[in-house]
Every structure is written in structure tokens, then in C-alpha cells.
Image (cartoon, rainbow, N blue to C red):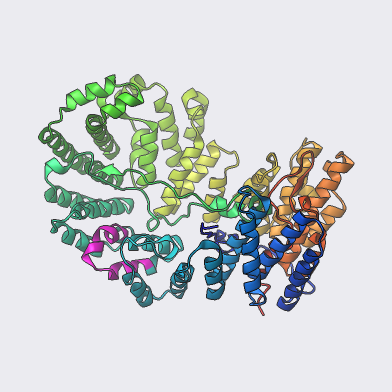
Amino acid sequence: MKSRFWIKSALAVALAIPGASSVGHAQVPAERTTLGRAIELVDAHLDKARHESNANLKRRQQIEGYLALLSLPSNHRQYEAADRLRAIDEALGDKPVSGDREVIEGGLNVVKSLAEERDDLQRIFLVDRQYSGLSSGEGVNQQYFWQLMRANDPDAMTWYFQSMQPGVVETAGIVNRGLGISLLCQHGHRSLARQVAIRLTEPELDHTIGPRLADLGATTEAEQRANRTMTQTTRRAPAGPEILIRLAVAASRRGDGAEVERLARKVIEAVEPRQFSPERRVSTDYGDCDWTVGRDFARRWQERSIYWQSAFKLTAEPSGTTPGRPYLVALAESVAGAGGGDRSVELIDQLIAIFDKSARENGIDLTNAAILAADTEGDAARRGNAPVLAWHWTRQSLILARVAAGGAIDEVAAKALGLDWAIGFLASYPHSGLARRIGDLSETERQSVERMNPRLLGRLLLMALVLEGKTADAQALIESDPAAVEFDGSRIVPLIEAQENAGLRPRAIASLDAYLGVFPAKDLAALRLLLMQGQTDRAKSMLRAFVAGGAGAFGVSDIFVGVMLMRELGDDMDVPALVGLRKGADALEASRRLVEIVDALAWDGKSTEIEAATRQLPREVAQLSAKDTACLRDTLQGLLAVSLARRGALEEGIRLVADRKLEQRQLCWAGRGYDSKPIFDVRFLVQEWVRRGHAAP
């Protein structure tokens, strides 16, 4: 088992909701299990395993017990547990697909996460050495990084960054200092990241740190790095214009048109026209340091679900990177994104003239390129003509930027105009006047757009009206234009998020109000915006709609998230009422709804309510067969055990799962049977008990 396991607990990263606790309204148990008693319980579990005659059950019990020991903040039998667990894992080497291996892998993820949370360097080092093949103490280095981050010590963190070797794999996957700055931003330490980035003054780091400084608002320092880089004759020299363009993008997102113009002119003066080819690109995507709204809220909510943890791996695949925008396109869009106007149109015209000159100097005939683009069909043909086509598409992007700044829409611009471009531009530049520009198209411009794409105008207008907060006009358009009816409204929500990220709260509130007026269906991203904006009553109403929706086919759907957040917002609707919110559900669907509801109550530590619901099942599930009823009660009892452990009553929870068969460690679904990864066992209960802080002395 050479791969590294690194998962943050859902509790550690749970999204904060105004006025809500991260662990809900957890009840205080009559008697909390002590750490000493927890150790005794795990020892007893291992002793029971020693006498178990069923080999498969025996092995599973041992795995659970050893993982539980490693999860506790105690040195009790830790080396024995690590050695025995390693031996079991090696013996499973010829079984690449194994329930036991899944338990080991998932359990070790949590062991290390819990050790990281309590700064247990010894446990981290032990797990690294035993299971990840890391004899260099990389996990300890990683933990030191988190310690310095939590201490918010710029002096110590700067020293840490300066001690790195560029390009060498280091703490937490850091391959360079730039990624380290991004990690600080990801974890909400933008001020610390800014201070450290400013202090990293080595010239060889300018190309990496400069764009981060721009994103962090350290404009003076970023421009100094750009100026210094542009005097170099090394391969890093192009980083100078890229830093300046990134500064222009950041200024545009602040709505600072004068600063964008200054930077654009500086880039024009610094770069020869011939060098403005489409291959010279710069990223204009939001980075970790200039996007503060949060991207993975849905995942964090779902990770609170017991079933979600039992059904899916919680590690995320690394996201890919976009190729960036050509220099002149990035500049033109920055100019248009700051608000637009006649002055912006004039500047973009200059950028287009520079591009045309660059094309001539590079031997590109733009007229022929346009003809080739019109005639080229098929992926193979496009790949073969990619260099020439890139010049054509770059010029099209410049024309669209001119439109966004307020330029007229002629036949050429109308042909280039598209919904994807408009959405992408508005997401990148929330201060842009493009939405207003679309709403104020002249009759001639409307006709040009309709000739080129008859169904485009209605969709563009609908998007623009919503972003302008014109609910009544948007509703009227929906009723009169079939193209508008077909528009996927969810594509508007990221644009409202961009408004929030830019600090445009009044505009975001108006846009969201119009969005919900036109697209009133339940929407998880819109719900998050309501919560961010403090619109609690509307959020509660939407949450009830979530809970009234259909249950997923044996998986977490809107119901878990709805009940969990309702409870955090103080809506304590009881279980029978929650189940009954959906009318006409058959017994099987009602049973799945009940499981999700109880899962949410388990997050909240509501063991008394879970016990009552288990004892007296809601009437909607009365038609289940005896077998399905027993199956349902089995799952509810497992959820009750987890709830008790989260409340602190670990011993009571273990008592409910101690004698379960192997299959009973899974969730049981009425009409289907047992189907999930193992979850109702000593290992999981102990880890949840530790997560909630009950293992503290």
C-alpha cells in the first residue's frame, strides 16, 4: 500500500452558515464515555476477535480494532496495532478488490486526519512509515506547515517557504512556493499568504509569485516583480507581461477601469507586436487567492452523511487547467470587463490593430484564415489547421470584447456571438456592463443576431434580464419566447456567485431574487447564496422543497442536505412530518426518505428522535413486508449507534453494533438488501467519537 491517504474530516472543513453551529444542536449524553473506557472497549473487541471461529469475521474485527486503537489519542498498543494491521494488509495482497482493504484504506485516511487535527506528529510519522512508504518524514513536514498556518506566524512561514527547493516535491504535495501560497488561500489564510508572498523576493520566483501577488491585491509588489522580470533575458522574461496582464484582470474584477487602461498600455509598450501571437497566453481563471466564495460547499454538506461516507471515496481528483487566453484577448476582455464605454472601445480598437499587425508580421492572412474556419469540418481537419485557425478565433474574441465594451454588433460580431462566450465573460468580469448592453440592443443589432442564430437572442436576453434584477420582464420573456423557455437557468447561478465574490452584494441579491422568480425550483447553489446573503426565511422554504422531493435510488439526495440544514437553521420539524412532506410516495420510497432523514438526525446527534422513529415507524412505511421492515430497522439502529457515539456515548453505540454480522455493517435498503461500504462497526464509531472531541481528557 504505497499510495498516500490524505482526507480532511467533514467537521474540520464544514461550510459555516450564519447563525448555525458546525455540529448542529447535539444533545448532551447522560454519561460520556471516557478515553480510558474507550480503550477498554476496543481491547475487549480485539479479544472477542481472537476467539471468533469465522475467519472472515475474525479478520474484519481485528482490522476494526486496530484502526480504532490508532484513531485514539493514546499510545496504548499503537505499535502492535500498526504492525498487525500492516501484516493483514500484506496478506490481502492477492485480493486487489476486497471489502477488508477498503476498510483499511478508508480507516487509515481518518486515522491520519485525526492525528493531523491534534498535531500528533508521532502517529503521523508511524502511519507514513508503515503504510505509505515514506521514511523521510514527509507527513511530519506537512504537519509543520499546518501548524505554522494555524499559528498565523508570517516570520516562521516565510522561513519555511525560503527553505524549500524550487521544483522539489515537498509538504502536502507542494512542488513549488506558488502552490504553497495557493494552499494558504484555500484554507482561508489570505492575509498570511500575502505577507509571505511579499517576502519571497528571489528573482527566480518572480514568474511564480508575481501572479499570486496580483490575486492577493499586492499590486505594487506584483508590478515590481513584472518590471524586474522584463529586464531579464532568460526564459522567464515572458512572465513580466503575464504578471501585468494578471494585474489588469484583477483590476477589472474590482471595476477599476483607469488602472486596467494604464496596465494595458504598459503591456503594449513592453511587447513587440510580432510577439502577440495566439500561442502567448496567460491564465485569467479565478485562482485560490482571488475566489473567496468557496467552490466545494455541496461536497462538504454531503460528506456529513453517513451513507455518503460509506458509498463514495471522499478524495477529489485534481482539476485540470485551462490553456489561458491570448495576451491581447486577456487585455481586451479586462478593458471591457471594468465597465466599458467609448474610451474602452477605442482602446480595444487599438489592440485589434496591434493584433492585425502581428498577424502580418507572422505571415498570417486573416482573410484566408476566416475562409478556412468557415470551410473546416471535423476534428482532424481542425487539428491540421490549428495554428492558422488560432489566429482567426483570437480575432473573433477581440471583436466580442469590443461588443462587451459597448461596440456595435455588426454581421461579423453577430456571427461570433455565442451564449457560452457571454456566460464565461460575465462570470470572469462581474463589473461588466454586458448584461445591460444585451438588454439595450438596437433593433438593427437584434436583427443581425437573429439572422445569424435565431434562438440565441431570447436566451441572451433572459440571462441579461435576470442579472439586471428585472423579474417581471424576464417572466414575460419566458412566456413569449420559446428559445428563452429552453434556457438552462442553472447557468446563471455562477454569474451571481461571481457578483458575490466581487463584493457586489446588492446586485447579487437582486439577481438572485430575479433568478428564483423565473426558476423557482429547488437549487443547491442558489440555496447556498441565500444562506450567504442572510435570507434565512427563503432558505428554509427552499429546504422544505428539498425534503419534499423524491428520494434517490439508494443514495444521498436532496433530503439529507435539506433536513440537516433545516435543523442547523432551527427548524425542528419532527420525523413523521418530514417523511410526510412528499405526498403519494409508496412504501419503498418512504423508507428511503426515512433513512436519509435519520442520517441527518445522526449528524445532529439526535439519538432520542432516532430511537423513537425506530420504535414507531411512520405510517408511510406500514405496507413494507416483514423482511423489508426488519431491513429498515437494522439500518436505523446502525444510524442510532453512530448518533450515540457522536453525542459521546460511545459504549452505548458499540453495544448496538458489537454483534453484527459482516453484511450488517452495511446499510440495508428495503427492496434491495445490504448495499454500501462497511460503516456500522467499532472502527467508525470510535473515529466519529474522537472527531467530536469526546476523547479529550
Classify 646 as above or below 444.
below
Residue 443 in view here:
no
Horizontally, is 694 left or right of 370 in the view? right
Measured as percent of width and height from the top left, residue 93 is found at 61, 53
Q: Quadrant of the C terminus?
A: bottom right
Residue drawn at 69 percent across, 39 percent down? 553
Q: For the magenta stretch, what is the residue range?
A: 193-212
Count numbered badges in the picture.
0
Query: Is 205 in the magenta?
Result: yes
Residue drawn at 67 percent across, 64 percent down? 688
Measured as percent of width and height from the top left, residue 92 is found at 64, 54
The residue closer to the viewer here, 480 or 22, is: 22
Classify 656 as above or below 673.
below
Residue 629 in view here:
yes
Q: Quadrant of the N terminus?
A: bottom right
Classify 313 as above or below 183.
above
Pick out the residue farthest to the right.
626
Query: Is 576 in the magenta?
Result: no
Residue 348 picture quarter:
top left
Classify 559 as above or below 377.
below
Identify the main secondary structure in magenta: helix
Measured as percent of width and height from the top left, residue 675 is found at 72, 45
The residue closer to the viewer here, 290 or 366, is: 366
Horizontally, is 144 left or right of 343 in the view? right
The residue closer to the viewer here, 243 or 631, is: 631
Measured as percent of width and height from the top left, residue 511 is found at 47, 44
Residue 231 picture quarter:
bottom left
